[in-house]
Amino acid sequence: MEKPRRVFVTGAGFTRALVPDAPLLVDDFGNDALVETVRSLPKASQLLEAERRRHPKGFINLERLMTRLDTLMPYDYDHKAVDEIDFLYSALKDSFLRRISGVRSGKFASDDLDAFVAHCTANGAACITFNYDDFLDEALASSGIWNADWGYGFYCRSSSTAVSAIGGDRLIARFLLLKLHGSVNWRALLGHESPYALAAIVHHHAWGNGDVPGHLRPQVERHLEPDPVIVPPVLTKSGLVAQSVLRFVWTRAFAELAAADGVTFIGYSFPETDSAARVLFSEALRDLPGDRVEVVGREHTDAGKIALKSRYRRLLGDIPDERFFFDGAVEWIRSLDAVRRS
């Protein structure tokens, strides 16, 4: 008899619970430095200042500001204004990526992350994530049953193949990590133009088997396009369709969800603004009973709990109260470990 297939879905709250310094969509992305970067650019400064004024601490709502910069208004088409907006957009993306990579030097709950990996690989078929970071990727690679060559749902060679024919032929992973918005460690080989062909994308990181030795990293970097393959957090995610790798990954995600015996959402707020994700889950999970859905979040107030339940139920039907866990991802993982040990 085939083992039931569970799919795990993780959002920003999952990474933040395990990596406390990880950024949220509304956060400080080196905002003061950004102000200095665009100080001589009046239109860019105006847009950045307008966004910062909307938060009491001057934080940036990354999705809102990136959407404004990505989707130009008719009155932006003064040549100088367009150039300034493009410059701010590029600087903001760089700051966002630096913030993600910078948290690797801080502390994170490695034992809890390893426990989650053990639970996933023992009980699930796939993890679908909206996160760009590669903390979970690294933990999965350390488990020994997942590898980056095959574990992303498509054949993704190591970046070492840019300078060597070695690598890329390990066994197919038994668990999938499907990254719907791309990943900080997905890079395109130099010379390929976006949107990238599937074969142009490699995984490039400093962990796991098949990574690039330290002395070769500068040489390998010269053979890669500088930016990772990601779709920035904007409301108009045209890149989801434009990038063949993301079309492929979303197709795999739909198939895994449609075949799932149960789905666990962890740290995912089900935002009303993410229309593509809402369509994915409503169509792929249309036949899954509500009692097969589990929701893990961190809500301390009755109002917050009611709001989260309402967002999920409006899209996925009548999920029972007992299928909601409001103490956060870390406590949920530890409760699983406690049951396993008892």
Image (cartoon, rainbow, N blue to C red):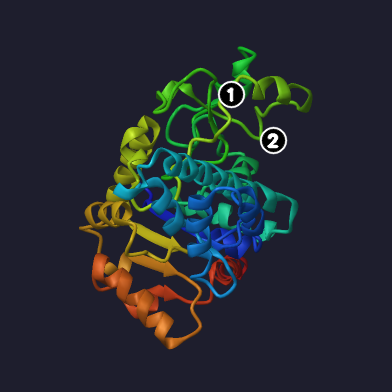
Nearer to me, 114 or 49: 49
Nearer to me, 185 or 124: 185
Foreground disc of the pair 2, 1: 1
Q: Quadrant of residue 27?
A: bottom right
x and y, in percent, of residue 193 in the image: 44, 22
x and y, in percent, of residue 124 in the image: 44, 51
Q: Quadrant of residue 137?
A: top right
Residue 333 visible in the snapshot:
yes
SS at circle 2: loop
Residue shown at the point (39%, 28%) measured from the top left: 195
Q: Amino acid at mark 2?
A: Ala
Q: Is residue 58 left or right of residue 89?
A: right
Name the outermost residue toward the bottom.
302
Q: Which residue is mark 2?
A: 206
Marks 2/1 in contact by CB < 8 Å: the verdict is no
Q: Which residue is mark 1?
A: 224
Q: Amino acid at mark 1?
A: Leu
SS at circle 1: loop
